[in-house]
Amino acid sequence: MGKKIDAAVLIVGAGPVGMAMAMDFQQRGIACIVVERRAFQALPSVKCNHVAARTMESFRRLGVAELLRGAGLPEDFEHSVAFRTTVTGHEMSRVYIPPRGSRFTDRSGPDGDWPTPEPPHRINQIYLEPLLQGHLASLAGVRLLNRHEVTGFTQDEEGVTTAVTNLDTGNSHLLRSQFIVGCEGGRSLVRKAMGAQFVGTSVIQHVQSTCIRAPQLLGLIPNAPAWGVYAMNPRRSGTLYAIDGRETWLVHNHVHPDEGDGAAVDRDRGIRDILGVGDDFHYEIITREDWVARRLVADRFRDRRAFIAGDSAHLWVPYAGYGMNAGIADGLNLSWHLSAWLRGWAGDAILDAYERERMPITEQVSHFAMDHAQALIRMRGAVPANIEAPGPEGDALRADIGRKAWELNVQQFCCAGLNFGYFYAGSPVIAYDGAEHPGYTMGGFTPSIVPGCRAPHFWLRDGRSVYDAFGRDYTLLRTAPEAETASFEEAARARGVPLRVLDVHGEDLPASYTQKLVLCRADLHVAWRGDVLPVDVEALVDQLRGAASPQSQNLSGTAASQTNAPSRLGNPPVSIVELS
């Protein structure tokens, strides 16, 4: 027997999803192990470029928002998206998003008035991941196993035994944990071992993507440079993203429907047609990043003690940046539910809530992304032959196309609905009251305290965000001083449910706070509301902690226990067993 490691959760994959989960577990006192194939601080591919407002709110709570805002594009480089005939050609319109240096003071863009303490941030994953990994490595209670690979796992009544191989030495180990979470991407071993299958549309579009180094390109771009440029011309339509704001760029060549998988498409010609440069323009290919746009969602997110999150659970067109961001929302939803169970104050039904809450949102967001992708495919296929024509006729045509491009894409790049509008409609641990949830679109939403919705943001008189005053688990907002809370506090205390009561009467509350008591969860979603407490406050507390439903999926195949339990953190410990 090797050295024992006390850890309740084994996370497979140290991408943004797995690392965010590990940071949240650490804050909640839950020891975990993160297994990652890559070496420590090894750079990922240039994938996600956008951290959504909702994700930045989570990073604020995890203590890394300021760290991340200090990195990415130069301070004065616009986070805007421009629509042009080519990257160096005519500009037709622009979704203005301020640079990071003025993100909190310049409110003139379409997302400038968003109700959040943390606006979105543009930072490529090659800068994001090393920052998160460096922070994670400094935290007690988290063990990073880089250059290790999970090769299989088995479940029993008390936990999970996972086989892991050291990729440098070839030695194999057994890791013992209470739960395993697969965050290792679309080829997830955890998903396959669970028997879960992807369902949906396997091919929407092929994209020939190339990361290039071209220091002279910045000087050829007219007007202010933008984080993203959509190029539309009869020869080739594509997208350019600034990686470092100086010399490194990512070029997406959107393969035409009649070009198959794009293997025969001239990569060099496509890049030059998108950039609008001649054969004398020099650039260097750093990596080829070709990808396929899909809409695939796993048919289940859980099998007893095994869970999946992020790309392991869903793959879709990465519009609105909602691959990684939705994955982080998965992970932090799951880490809270698991930690509640592990700390002993929640019943087995709280483990069902993850799939019940996140799977419907995944379906909704994936359809938003697919519908938007198809609309863009139609727009690219209808580019007029004379879009680059000089003179008033060409100017009028470009103005019309620019307006249409802005209207279609502002909802993608300033997607308030996807950030703040989604709600949990069928959770076993939310107390619904029969009120209808307000609908939302990719770009729009209605703030609401209907149970399941995100608690609307407001600033406190002392300058803090109300979210900064929330507890780590449940926060009961009291908007009227006469509202009685003592019986609820006592019921929560008797069952070990962490609760903070926050008096906000006299604050500048949004109009959506129409009731005197609003109970909010760690993920900011409303769990219950009312002007007075229910007569049976014990029943309410039992529902919130997942101890009221006899229908929960069992961990071991026997009848599920719904009674309160002491902390489960000590059983079983995690140990490493050398097999060779």
Image (cartoon, rainbow, N blue to C red):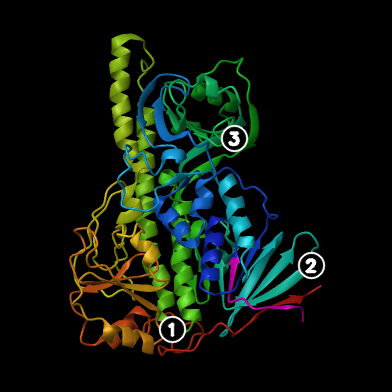
Q: Quadrant of residue 166?
A: bottom right
Q: In the rendered image, which residue does mark 2 sit on?
A: 171
Number of residues whose C-alpha sits closer than 10 Å to that of mark 3, classed few (under 14), some (14–19) or many (20 or more):
many
Q: In the rendered image, which residue does mark 1 sit on?
A: 345
Number of residues whose C-alpha sits closer than 10 Å to that of mark 2, classed few (under 14), some (14–19) or many (20 or more):
few
Measure the alpha-carbon separation of dots 1 and 3: 49 Å
Residue at figure coordinates x 45%, y 27% from the top left: 237
Q: Name the residue type under label 2.
A: Asn
Q: What x and y, as percent, mark residue 16? A: 54, 56
| Secondary structure beneath label 2 | loop
Q: What x and y, as percent, mark residue 342? A: 50, 80
Q: Which of marks 1 and 3 is nearer the N terminus?
A: 3
Q: Vertically, is 41 above or below 559? A: above
Q: What x and y, as percent, mark residue 83? A: 39, 28
Residue at figure coordinates x 28%, y 23% from the top left: 400
Residue 300 visible within the image: no
Q: Residue 211 carries which label?
A: 3
Which image quarter is the C terminus in? bottom right
- Report the number of discs: 3
Q: Nearer the viewer, mark 1 or mark 3?
A: 1
Disc 1 + disc 2, Cβ < 8 Å: no
Q: Nearer the viewer, residue 38 or 197?
A: 38
Q: Name the residue type under label 3.
A: Cys
Q: Earlier in the sequence, mark 1 or mark 2?
A: 2
| Secondary structure beneath label 1 | loop
Residue 276 visible within the image: yes
Measure the alpha-carbon separation of dots 1 and 2: 39 Å
